[in-house]
Image (cartoon, rainbow, N blue to C red):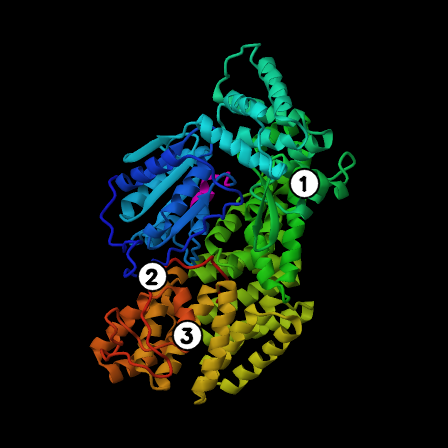
Amino acid sequence: MRRLHDPCPNPDDPDARPAPAPGNLPAELNPFVGREDELAELGGLLEESRLVTVAGVAGVGKTRCVIRVAALREKRYCDGVLLAELSAVRHPDLLEHALIDALGLTDHTSRPPRATLVEHLSERRTLLVIDGFEHLVDACADLVTELLRRAPRLQVLAAGRCPLRVDGERTFPLAPMSDGDAVELFTERARGVRPGWEPTAGERASVLELCRRLDGIPLALELAAGRLRALSVEQVLLRLDDRFRLLTGGRRGAPPRHQTLRTAIGWSHELCTPEQRLLWARLSVFAGSFDLEAAEYICGGPELPADSVLDVLDELLAQSVVEREDGPTGARYRLLDTVSEYGAQWLAAAGDTPRLRRRHRDWFLGLATWCELDWFSPRQAEVAARIDSELPNLRRAMECSMESPDEVHLAQYLAGTLWFYWAGCGRLSEGRHWLDHVLEEPTPHDAARLKVLWVLGYVAVLQGDAVGAISALQECREEAERSGDATALAYAVHRTGCLAIVTDDLPRAEELLRDALGRYRDVGELNSNVLMAQVELAMAVAFLGDLDAAAAICDEVREVCEDHGERWALAYALYVLAYAALRRGRPARARQMLRECLAIGRTFNDLLGTVLSLELLALVTAVEGDAGEAAVLQGAAEGIWPSVGLRLFGSAFYGRPRAECEEQARRELGNTAYEEGLRAGRRLDPATAVDRALADGGPAAAMDGRGAGGAPTAGGPRGTRRPAASRMTGRGGPERW
């Protein structure tokens, strides 16, 4: 697979347009050491091939190398460098969802996730870094092959213990570090536990010998360096040498590299205290990263009190057994894959794996329950970030429950409880996967299964799958009536009304939504779903012409949102109020509310709320007399809809503002200038379009500095703008209706 000629600007050319280069590469928490020749060779391979795989034994430094070379070449990729870490993905069915997550995509549609990936990457100049794929090698090879075939400007840099073995792949076997680099790495990491440490003249020979005994494997070197907190270099070397001879039958030659690493890990394990070994083993139950609270609950017990976990964890951090990473939710921790595998073996040998997996599952059931409740509060953004961080562990919790027929109901409970994440944070596709999956096993129609059914119906509505929605909601309704579950029945009625409004059956939508709200009152339900039912009722009423009634409903929603700090439903209430204000001849008031909608939507990365607001704002802009900017906003909305679903739901009522805007803009601009404005808008990624709208927009400007109407874009209150080139969207967010 030869690299195609790329029109991206030269990053060293000061006159070139700067590439947006979005990405998710992690910041380096400690200095990268050595490997200059390897990095240069890898860079050369990326000039020659579209698929380069760095292969090598565990602990040899594959991940650090690919991240480093990707960071060094980041400016060469106009559409960004994205890292997909696959070690925590246990099932091939989740591979495509993991890549969608890495690319920060949001897709409301029911199309296969692979189609979403292909569409997004097809015209983009992107470097996709795939790490830790060896347990998914067949599925990963198949996916990478198709992506490279369908996306001619895509390059893939992979890291794993084996090649993908596909056509066009260039494999780079990563060898252990040279003596010089190994000594430098050991010294640098030793300073982490003994600041300012320098080997004495007498120690230098011992350091070199130690590095050679460890075969220059970076992970082994880092583990050994962590021992300098308590031992001298000579003591480390002596004890490690004894360990080697024990495990290799007394041979003095260097053992095979995989045995070297296992020996180094095992020796580090032996030097741990009993409490450290116990925590190490128990931490292996996590998928991906974890926080201190989870570690204290899951790993604590009589042999390791919860209040001592922090101290023991700190000791494992100092010994490089555990790594710390900081993110939106604060400090988190993880075990490297090889270290986790070693701990898991000890946990299994102790016969404690089933118990720890259940504790892990129970903790994340509780976390999901808390997050669902806290979604209806000022902490919605915090909840979204928390679930994002915990997704690998939540997946593992559902997988754990699906392994036993007696516990499938717990998987159903978890999948249903996460409704706010599937539907509210742009995870419809993966949510649909889990909701369908947990329903595969026959279980009684208890509350957990009924909740899965109405959540599935809701997700199907948002995906435009009317048949799937009706099937799930009808089953939920029938079984809820049979079992007397009034709460599940209210939700089934509500979501059926939601389906009616997007399919333009407004009288039935109003009837069902009023019925659902009455049922919610009867059972004492008040949360974001209930507020959305009110907003949807207001929209139906507004479409039917009663603007006063619609505004009154949404004013009530605003009051409840203010009382509870709820922002997500508030944005949709403001959207309806803006619609009513515009119809009443108050475009300035409508613009003010739509700007607030967009600001809230940006907080949640709410793609559906964003595109609906942009559509209505385009009409507001046309009414205010700026047909050129209205065309740009319509073009921006047009570019977003494919990731949301059927444009404006295929609804005549939702589509009316767009039709009115287009008619007015074409009349004022002429067809040619209107189409130029649309093209300029399509070049805006969602984040740039929102920034433009929040800054009161700007005259549509083509790359030659002319506006959408063909006139030069001179000064004025809005200033001159250049539409930005398409960029990757941010992490997926809530999308509604």
Task: Tell me the distance, in whole angstroms, between the alpha carbons under discs 2 and 3.
Answer: 16 Å
Image coords of residue 401 (percent x, y): 61, 41
Residue 433 numbered mark, or none: none
Whole-number angstrom distance, CA of label 2 to CA of label 1:
44 Å
Q: Which residue is mark 1?
A: 314
Specify the quadrant of the image occupied by residue 138.
top left
Residue receiving disc 2: 726
Observer-nearest residue: 713 or 115? Answer: 713
Furthest residue toward top: 250
Q: Secondary structure at mark 3?
A: helix
Nearest to the eye among marks 2 and 1: give it. Answer: 1
Can you give x and y, in whole percent of width and height, for residue 129 in the image? 40, 43
Image quarter of residue 487: bottom right
Viewer-side residue, 4 vs 657: 4
Taking the spot 51% from the left edge, 17% from the top edge, the residue there is 255
* Mark 2 crowd level (few <14, some 14–19, many ≥20, 10 Å Cα): many
**Type of residue at label 3?**
Ala
Up/down of 611 relative to 100, above or below: below
Q: Residues within 10 Å of mark 1 (few under 14, many from 20)?
A: some
Q: Let me know if residue 184 appears in the view.
A: yes
- Quarter occupied by the N terminus: top left
Instruction: Please report the bounds of the magenta region as a residue range.
Output: 89-96
Alpha carbon of mark 1 to alpha carbon of mark 3: how far?
Answer: 47 Å
**Residue at image mark 3:** 693
Q: Amino acid at mark 2?
A: Ser
Furthest residue in direction bottom, as rendered:
585
Q: Look at discs 1 and 3 and give the one toward the viewer.
A: 1
